[in-house]
Image (cartoon, grey):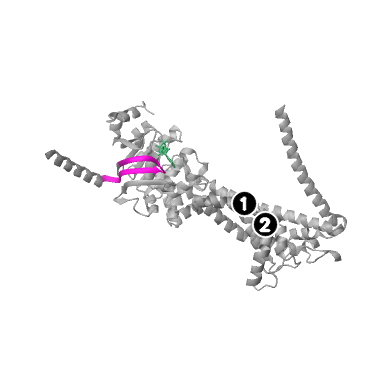
Amino acid sequence: MLEKLSARIFLFCALLSVVSLLLIVGFVFYKGSHPFVAEGYSFFDFIFGMDWVPSEDKFGIFPMIVASLFATIGALIIGVPVGLFTAIFLAEIAPKRVAKIISPAVQLLAGIPSVLYGVFGLAIIVPFLQNNLGLVKGQSLLAVILVLAIMMLPTVVTVAETAIRAVPKMYREGSLALGASQIGTIFKVVVPAAKSGIMAAVVLGLGRAIGETMAVILVAGNSLILPTSLTDSVRPLTTNIALEMGYAFGTHQEMLFATGIVLFSFILLLNFVLAKISSKGGN
Amino acid sequence: MGTTVIERNEEVRNSKQTNETAKINVKDLDLFYGDKQALYKVSLDIHEKEVTALIGPSGCGKSTFLRSLNRMNDLIDGVKITGDIVIDNENIYETNDVIKLRTKVGMVFQKPNLFPMSIYDNVAYGPRMQGIKSKKELNKIVEESLRGAAIWDEVKDRLKTSALGLSGGQQQRVCIARAIAMKPEIILMDEPTSALDPISTLKVEELIANMKKDYTIVIVTHNMQQAARVSDKTAFFLNGEIIEYDETNNIFSMPKDQRTEDYVTGRFG
Ligand SMILES: Nc1ncnc2c1ncn2[C@@H]1O[C@H](COP(=O)(O)OP(=O)(O)OP(=O)(O)O)[C@@H](O)[C@H]1O
Ligand SMILES: [Mg+2]
C-alpha cells in the first residue's frame, strides 16, 4: 500500500517536471515561431540580419549571436584552464590543510548571485579596462569574457576537483611506482582518467556562462553592433531578451521569444559538440 | 676472552659475506604511521637473483615493509622512518632521487592496476616517462616486456585495445610486463595472485620462477604453498617484527621458532 503510494508520488513528481519543461519549451517555440510561420518574416533575415530596430520593424540578431559566441568561447578559453589547474592544485598538490579551507570556499563562490559578479565587474573590471586600455567605455566584450570566466570558475573547479579526487589511488601509485614524477602522473594518468568528469565540469561551466544575463547586462555595454574587437561594446542574446521583454509587445515580443529559441538551440549545439569531443577523446 | 674473539671474528666474516651478496640490506628499520608503530627494528638481507617471500598474519607489516623498499610509504602523510635500507651500497633514504630508485625497484600491486589506456601505452608508459620517444625502440621494449611476462602471445593482436578489457590474470601479467619494461633490478610484489583464479595464479608463479634468473624478487603472500613453491628465502613477520628468516625449506620443514611453526602449519591467525 505504502509502496504503491510512494511509487505514485515519484511518478507524479517526474511527470510534473517533464510536463512543465515541455510547456516552457512549447510556449517559447510557439511564440517565437509565430512571426515566421504566420506573419511572413524571413527566418534567414532574422538570423543573419545586421540591424535590430523594432520600431522600424527590423529584427536582425546576427551581431548578438556573434557576441554570445565570442563571449562564451572567450570565457571558456580563460575559465577552463584556470579552473582545471586550480582543481588539480587543490586535489593533488596543495597540502590537505590548505585544500580543506580553499575547496569549501570555492564551492561557496558558486552560490553567489550572479548580479554580484556583475557588480564586481562593473566596479573593478570595467574601470580597470577603461584606464589601462585607454577605452572610452570599459563595458566591452572583454569585460563580459572576464566576468563570465570568473563566474564559471567555482563550477569548473568544484566539479573537476571532485572528478580528480575520484580517480582511484591505485592509478597514482602505479604511475609513481614506475618512476614517474608527480606532475607526470597528474597529466598522463590522473587527468586522463578523470576526463569525463572534467568534461562535465566544462559543460556545466559553459551552461553557467552562456545563459548568464544579469551580470552580463552590467558590463556588456549593450551596443547593437557586430563586434570586431575585444574592446567593442556588445549585446549578447540573453541581455537582448532581458532588456526589452519588459516593454515589448506584438511582433517585437515574439521576436524576443525567437531570440530565446536561438539561445536554446545554441546551448544544445554546444553541449552536443562538447559531448562529441569528449567521446572522441575516449577512444 | 678467547671465545669473545672468536665470536667477533665470526661476526666480521658474516657481515662481510652479507655485504658481498646482499642486494638489499635492511638494518634496524622502524616505521611509524603517525604515533602508531608498524615496524620494529626490522633487519633483513635480501640476496640478488633470489625470490624472497614475506609471510605473516594480516596487519603484521608485510606491505609496509615492502613499500619501504621503493619508498612508496613517502606518499602517506605522517609516516616516519628510521634505520637504514641500503640497496647496492646506497642508502635509499639518503638520496633525493626517488625516481631513479623506483626505476631500479619495480612494483606489482595486489590488485591489477593497469591504467585506462591501451595495453601498448600501459607497457610503454614507464619508458616514455624516462624520455624514450623512438617508436622503434618502444615497440621493442613493449614486445620484450610482454614476452618476459609470458603474455605476448595472448595480447599481441590487441595491443592497441584497452588494457581493462583483459581478464584479471592477464592484467596482472601485463602489470608485471609494465614493471619489466623499466628494466628494473628488483621487483616487489604485494600478494600478486590474491585476486586471481588458480590457473592464472599458476601462470604467475611460473613466471616468477622464470624471472628469478634476471631479477631480485621480493614477494608478499598469504599462500603458504605459494611461498614454498616460488621462494628461496622466507621471512616470517609478526606484529611488525621479523620472527624468523631463513631458507624457505627450513622455514617450512624445521622452523626454529614455535610461532613460525604455528603459523606455517596453520595453527595460528
Ligand atoms: N596508511 C596507513 N595509515 C595508518 N596505519 C596503517 C596504514 N597502512 C597500514 N597501517 C597499519 O600498519 C600495520 C601493518 O599494515 P600492513 O598493511 O603493512 O600489513 P600487512 O602485513 O600487509 O597485512 P595484510 O596481510 O592484511 O596485507 C597495520 O596495523 C595497519 O593497520
Ligand atoms: Mg598487505
The stretch in magenta equals: B21-43
Quarter of the rendered structure image containing ligand 1? top left
Q: Distance between the residues labelled 2 and 1?
A: 18 Å
Pick whichever, B88 or A232, lies toward us. Answer: A232
- Label 1 secondary element: helix
Output the chain of dot 2: A
- Label 2 secondary element: helix
Q: What residue type is labelled 2?
A: Ala
Are circles 2 and 1 on residues that touch, CB within 8 Å? no
Is there any visible trace of residue B150 in the rendered image?
yes
Above or below: residue A226 compared with residue B237: below
- From the top left corner, tell me how far across and down residue A239 is, in percent: 75, 60
Say how many tags the image has. Answer: 2
**A27 sits to left or right of A219:** right
Output the chain of dot 1: A
Residue matched to label 2? A209
- Residue positioned 80% across, 51% down in the render: A29
Task: Name which of mark 2 and mark 1 comes first in the sequence.
Answer: 1
**A64 sits to left or right of B27:** right
Q: What residue type is labelled 1?
A: Leu
Estimate how packed mark 1 is, as few (under 14), some (14 to 19) or many (20 or more) residues with alpha carbons within 10 Å: few
